[in-house]
Image (cartoon, rainbow, N blue to C red):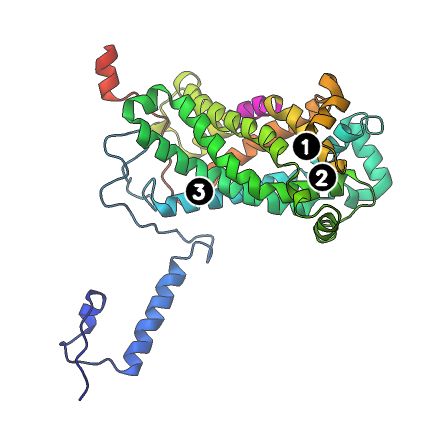
Amino acid sequence: MIEACQPLSLFREFLIDEGCLFSQVNRNAIMLSWIQEAAKMNPFSSPFTTAKCQPLENGLVANRNIVAASVVEGDSCEFGSNHYFLLCGLGGILSCGLTHTGITPLDLVKCRIQVDPQKYKSVFNGFRVTFAEDGTRGLVKGWAPTFFGYSIQGMFKFGLYEVFKVQYAALAGEELSYEYRTSLYLISSASAEFFADIGLAPFEAAKVKIQTTPGYANTLRQAMPKMYADEGLSGFYKGLVPLWLRQIPYTMMKFACFERTVELLYKHVVPKPRSECTKSEQLVVTFAAGYIAGVFCAIVSHPADTVVSKLNQEKGATAGDVLKKLGFGGVWKGLGPRIVMIGTLTAAQWFIYDAVKVWLRMPRPPPPEMPESLKKKYGVA
């Protein structure tokens, strides 16, 4: 006597009554359909595939327009859902990994100017000397740790920024989130970068070793074991604190300046409301705001960047030792090329990140507007 099976809601259309059993053929057909559906929902299966996200039933945060946006018809997922945050992380991987790898030659010359200004006197001189000594391949030294390190960093930087921005805004409430939105951007980005740099630090240390220590290693596979044998696990993280001092101010400026610049551009420069702009026009605004933010980022974070480069070059040195050796003027060496590099880099990162959102049809809320309660409070029409 075969026991009756309890029908599940998922199979209701397939069941005839409670006492039936599926044949092996039917089981195989259902399993195949599940696999086909899973393949369709894989965002990596085709460049034309749209990611599907599970919407939240009751919205993210009621009546808080800075942290939640209604699902617009055509969007692939709801703002603030877990899938939204994961896709933001994917955007960060593409944004940071590709851009940092693309400017490896400029980054290499910048690092060499910082650690050996007597030999590498300027950007053009640095390129000329490097090419003369190592050829074309010498200009792309360190591309592998750059790609992997900054891909990991980008995933946490952008993904966690969106998470923290939503969570902190929910804690602050609608009115405070709007009035102190710059502080919200600063705190959210700092929190995200704290974790992002933990993933970046080992690869950054390897990159600097490869680029600035002649004969040490030519590839990531050579550098990592050698660093571990020389200094142990601590060798990968001895530059973490200076990295935080470089990257956290940089990221705070990158996100806060970008968010407020976008807001100001739409308010004072763009001749029509954002809602009337095409996707292409919006991406142009994104690029412009990203470049402006990048210039400020470079200036704010440059002294710490110089310390990181020098620290990872010299075995056993501390940040204090490096600062004493370089002096005030020394920490500003290489600022010119870094402004060009970071300005272009930041603009490209924001452009790619926003373009990924467009490509995946993710929600892209407009700049925040003053809540009705504040308009009444301040008598704003």
Q: Which residue is mark 2?
A: 208
Q: Nearer the viewer, residue 88 or 102?
A: 88
Q: Could you tell which of marks 3 and 1 lies nearer the N-terminus?
A: 3
Looking at the magenta stretch, what is its main secondary structure? helix
Residue type pointed to by label 1: Val
Residue type pointed to by label 3: Cys
Q: Which residue is mark 1?
A: 308
Query: Magenta part of the protein: which range?
Result: 290-298
Which of pointers 1 and 2 indicates the residue nearer the eye? 1
Q: Nearer the viewer, residue 280 or 143?
A: 143
Residue type pointed to by label 2: Val
User: Where does residue 72 sit, x and y in percent of width and height?
Assistant: 29, 39
Q: Residue at x 28, y 40 (%)?
A: 71
Q: Mark 1–mark 2 contact, CB under 8 Å?
A: yes
Residue 309 location, quadrant: top right
Q: Could you tell which of marks 2 and 3 lies nearer the N-terminus?
A: 3
Numbered badge on residue 245: none
Q: Residue at x 70, y 21 (%)?
A: 332
